[in-house]
Amino acid sequence: MTNPVQQDQFIQFMNSIGLPDLKQDAVAVAVSGGADSLALAHLLNGWGEFKELHILSVDHGLRAESVDEVKLVRKFAKKIGAKFKSFKWLGDKPERSIQEAARVARYDLMEHYCASKKIGYLFLAHHGDDQVETFLFRLAKGSGLDGLGAMKPLQSYNDRLQLVRPLLAVGHDNLIATCERAGIEWAEDPSNNSVKYMRGRMRGSRDALENEGLTIKRVGQIATRLDRARSFIDQYTEKKEEIIVSIKETNRIEIILSELRTEHSEVIIRIIRNSIRRLVPHTPYPPRLEDMERLADRIARPDFRGATLGGVKFVVRKRDDLLELLLEKF
C-alpha cells in the first residue's frame, strides 16, 4: 500500500527549502485539477505559513474536459477558503511541440498574475516521477549538462518570481494516496499517458526501468552529481569571462581569441552561449547545443574566419587577436 504524504513530512520538505518568513505574504499554487497539484494545494493549506493562498488554474483549450477541470479546482479552492483565478490560453495553437507551447503559455499567464498581486512565490507540484521523466526526456533529446541537471526545489523564474517545488522527494502514487485520504476529488488527464506524446511513452516504460534500478532516488542522485559538475564549469567559465570577454555595447562583444582557443571545448561552448544570450536575451529560438558545439570546434582552428549563429555574427580580427560578436542585421 502506498503511503500518503503526512503533514509533518510536508513541513520537513518546506523547512529544507530555505524559504524566508512568508507570514505577511500571499503565495500562489498552480493547480490543474489532477491529483498531484490538488494534493500540493491541500498540504500547503495545512502548512499555512502565509498570509493568503491563491490557487491558479489554466484552461489550455486543448481538451473538452478542461472546462470541467477548472470548475473542479474552483470548487476545491472555495472549500478551503483560498483565492481562485482561472486563465484561458487564447490564440492559435502550434501543430508541433504543443505540450511545450502550453507550458510556456501557462507560466506566462501565471507570472503576469503573480506580478499584478505582488506574489513572489509560485508553488508547483513537480514530484519525483516528473524528475525521472524529465531526465529521460532530455537524455533522449541529447541534452548536455544543463538539461540533465535536477529540477530544483527553489528556482528563480525572473527577478520578481521564485518557483517552489516541495514534492520532489515523493512520487505520484504518494500524492494520489494523499488525495484519497483527504477525500479530494481529482481529474485524470488522458494526455499524461497518451502514446501520442513522448512523456506518455516514457511513462509506459517506467516499470521496466525501475526494475533495473532507475528509481526516483537514483535519478535524483545522478542529476545532483551532474549539477555539481555543471556548477563547477559555470564558476570556472564565469571567472574566465571576467578576463577575456569585454562587453563593449549592447550590440557588441569582444573576446581575446588566443586565450579562448586555449580553453576546453566545454568552456568555449559556454562562452559562446553566454555571449549570444547577452546580445539576444529574449529570443524564442536559441541555438541548439549541436550548433554551438560545431562553432566551438571551428573557432578552435587557426583557419577560422567567421560565422553566424543565433542572430549573432562572429568575426575574427586577427591583427587585434579578437573575436568580435555583433548583432546580425536583418
Image (cartoon, rainbow, N blue to C red):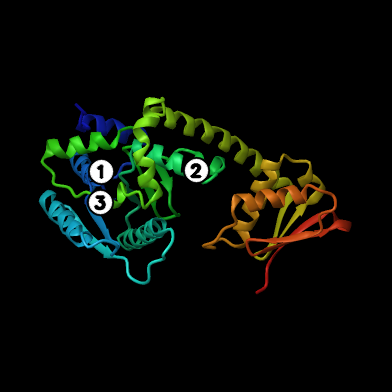
Counting other residues with Cα less than 10 Å from the Cα at mark 3, is it few (<14), some (14-19), or many (20 or more)? some
Mark 2 or mark 1: name the one nearer the start of the chain: 1
Q: Residue at x 22, y 49 (%)?
A: 188
Counting other residues with Cα less than 10 Å from the Cα at mark 1, is it few (<14), some (14-19), or many (20 or more)? many
Q: Which mark is residue 189?
A: 3
In the rendered structure, the answer to whether residue 94 lies left or right of residue 85 reads right
* Image quadrant occupied by the C terminus: bottom right
Q: Residue at x 35, y 42 (%)?
A: 165
Q: Is residue 19 visible?
A: no
Of the two numbered discs 3 and 1 in the rendering, the one whose residue sits closer to the viewer: 3
- What's the CA distance linking mark 2 and mark 1? 25 Å
Q: Which mark is residue 36?
A: 1
In the rendered structure, the answer to whether residue 144 lies left or right of residue 192 reads right
User: Residue 326 at x, y = what percent?
Assistant: 71, 64
Q: Residue at x 80, y 50 (%)?
A: 257
The residue lying furthest to the bottom in this view is 330
* Nearest to the observer: residue 116 or residue 275: 275
Q: Dot 2: what SS?
A: helix
**Residue type for callout 2:** Ala
Q: Dot 1: what SS?
A: helix
User: Residue 52 at x, y = what percent?
Assistant: 22, 51
Counting other residues with Cα less than 10 Å from the Cα at mark 2, is it few (<14), some (14-19), or many (20 or more)? few
Q: Which residue is mark 2?
A: 140
Residue 314 found in image quarter: bottom right
User: Residue 45 at x, y = what percent?
Assistant: 19, 43
Q: Are marks 2 and 1 in contact (CB under 8 Å)?
A: no
Q: Are marks 3 and 1 in contact (CB under 8 Å)?
A: no
